[in-house]
Amino acid sequence: MKVVENRMPRRKTNLDVRRLITASVIEVFSTMFSFQAKPVAKPPPHSTSRIAGCVGIAGSSIGGSVYIHLPEKLARAAAAELLEIEAEKLVDGAAVNDLVGELCNVITGTLKAALSRAGNHCASSPPTVIRGSAFAIETPLEVAKTSVAFVCRRQYFTVEVYLTNHDRSV
Amino acid sequence: MKPTSQPPVILSVDDSAMVRKMVARAFRPFDCVLLTAANGEEGLALAESENPDLILLDITMPVMDGITMLHRLRGEAATRKIPVIMLTAESSRDTVAHMAKLGVRDYVVKPFKEEELAGRVRRVIPLKKHDEAELRRPGTSEAARRGRKQRAP
């Protein structure tokens, strides 16, 4: 018996997610920490311990999640900047987690506003944070993925947006 | 009504400690009292007990979100008239319209610049910088006031 898998291609959204996320990240890093983040075409693979913030979004016509993957060193530097202390003196992991979660929350807010303008109203979850060095986010093929990479203070980080369209309206 | 010599009380309600830190930094130059709460339930309790002059309120929070807290504030005689400024990552049209119906005075979208936040608050309540407030405190002699003004850059 031959089994033929019906692999659907990844759906694409009409929203320019890449442009939205790029503008949002640049603004957030500049406003919150006075750090300059620049988009890059091809980042190196994740090699160091990183912290990922995640916010889920859910609506009647669209759902998904937003992740920001930050090297731990960069996350600590940003948290230290906000707390006005030296990064080496930052021992509170919870503060760094809070920062990464809030970053993801703010970036997701920009995306949600754009989705709402396009008629796709959705709610978002409180952020969650994952720490580790050897993990990847994997989703079913029908979920559209947009990954945008950045460099900031010579360290690379990425923002991933996963969206699934319930009624192909996006 | 509070005596005008007392510094205004601002209540910041946000589940992110980092955001509460940023808000504290924004108001450091000003003569005010900053109270903080990590969710709507704590915020409501503080609003009822402390009667702040202004509330800065996030939307997405655990335990009790900002919209629920706002409804509860508007439902109580003691807290109904406290001005509220939303400070949130939510900026969709529906959310803004809903907040406007609940009588929110202003809406600041994150990320925010500290000067912008302070400016928006100053449109709602009188906020003086520390040196301005000292000059106006009761009991300060006119001569001392003149002396300080001359020394100020």
Image: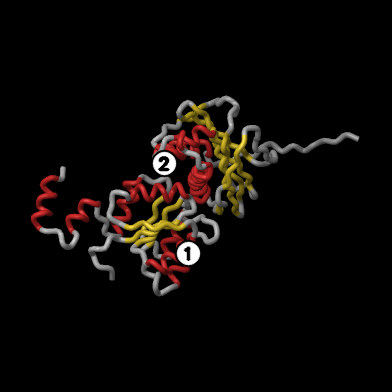
Q: Dot 1: within a 10 Å radius of its alpha carbon, few (fewer than 14), some, or many (20 or more) residues?
A: many
Q: Quadrant of the N terminus of chain A?
A: top right
Question: Mark 1 and mark 2, same subunit?
Answer: no
Residue A92 location in percent, x, y? 50, 42
| Residue drawn at the location 48% of the way across and 56% of the way down | B38
Of helix, strand and loop, which one carries label 2?
helix
Q: Is residue B119 visible?
A: yes
Front residue of B75/B133: it is B133
| Residue drawn at the location 56% of the way across and 36% of the way down | A69
Amino acid type at mark 1: Met
Amino acid type at mark 2: Leu
As drawn, the label of residue A82 is 2
Residue A160 location in percent, x, y? 57, 38
Q: Is residue A114 visible?
A: no
Image position of B100 with respect to A169: above or below:
below
Front residue of A86/A142: it is A86
